[in-house]
Image (tube, rainbow, N blue to C red):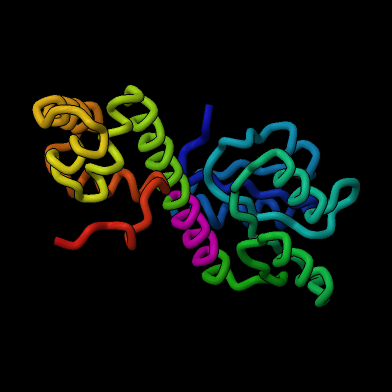
Amino acid sequence: MSEQPNTVYVVDDDAGMLESTQWLLESVGLQVRPYADGRRFLEAVEPEQTGCVVLDIRMPGLGGLNVQEELQKRGSQLPIIFVSGHADVPIVVRAFKSGAFDFIEKPFNEQLLLDSVQQALQQHQATSTRQQGDAQTDALIASLTRRERDVFLPLAQGYTSREIAEQLDVGIKTIDLYRARVMKRLGVERVPDVTGIAIAAGLLDPLELRTR
């Protein structure tokens, strides 16, 4: 089961830093899951969980960059905010090249960390919402029968029932029937909404739309 969208996973082997970071984040209403080492964090987190990670770079055993690499292998899209008291350039560059959301040096300004965490949470929430929308769009299109799909794309492109009937070599009344069924399955009432679904699914380039 996924955590709430505002969950922040804090991973730091420094007990004092772990506790103070947890207190800071909870003071602004965020839900925090603290972990003293990277391996325990990886054992607890699931790829589909949402939120963000505040991750120490240098830890005994499994370091922050290794944790980042393992999360990527699992397909996790949790934004990672690295914190470190030893932010040498090669490490910072490697972290960002691997997709880090931010890199903050210890001791950090509290507001700087809070701002970064809020931005990471907002970005991840927006990404998750967009992906859910994409999945719903794909499911709607997959629900169409083969004949409905034949009508769906030219309808989305702006062709009239008569033009579609000529393309498919069937009667206009048949096309009108399929047109109504397509729109009902997709849950829309207007042709522009059909067009929007086709574009969102990557089946139609906006440049292919007909101009009347």
Confirm whether the magenta stretch covers residue 119: yes
> Left or right: 50 with respect to 28?
right
> Left or right: 73 with respect to 150?
right
Query: Magenta-highlighted stretch: main secondary structure?
Result: helix
Residue 196: percent from left, percent from top: 27, 49
Q: What is the magenta range?
A: 114-125
Please tell me whether residue 174 is drawn above or below residue 11 in the rendered image. above
Residue 142: percent from left, percent from top: 39, 28
All told, the count of numbered labels is 0
Q: Which quadrant of the view contains residue 134?
A: top left
Residue 26: percent from left, percent from top: 51, 50
At 74% from the left and 51% from the top, the residue drawn is 68
At 18% from the left and 49% from the top, the residue drawn is 192
Please, which residue is most extreme toward the left here? 173
Viewer can see residue 39: yes
> Left or right: 114 with respect to 185?
right
Confirm whether the magenta stretch covers residue 170: no
At 25% from the left and 39% from the top, the residue drawn is 167
Please, which residue is most extreme toward the right here? 61
> Left or right: 147 with respect to 176?
right
Please tell me whether residue 181 is drawn above or below residue 74 in the rendered image. above
Q: As rendered, which of 145 and 102 lies closer to the eye?
A: 145
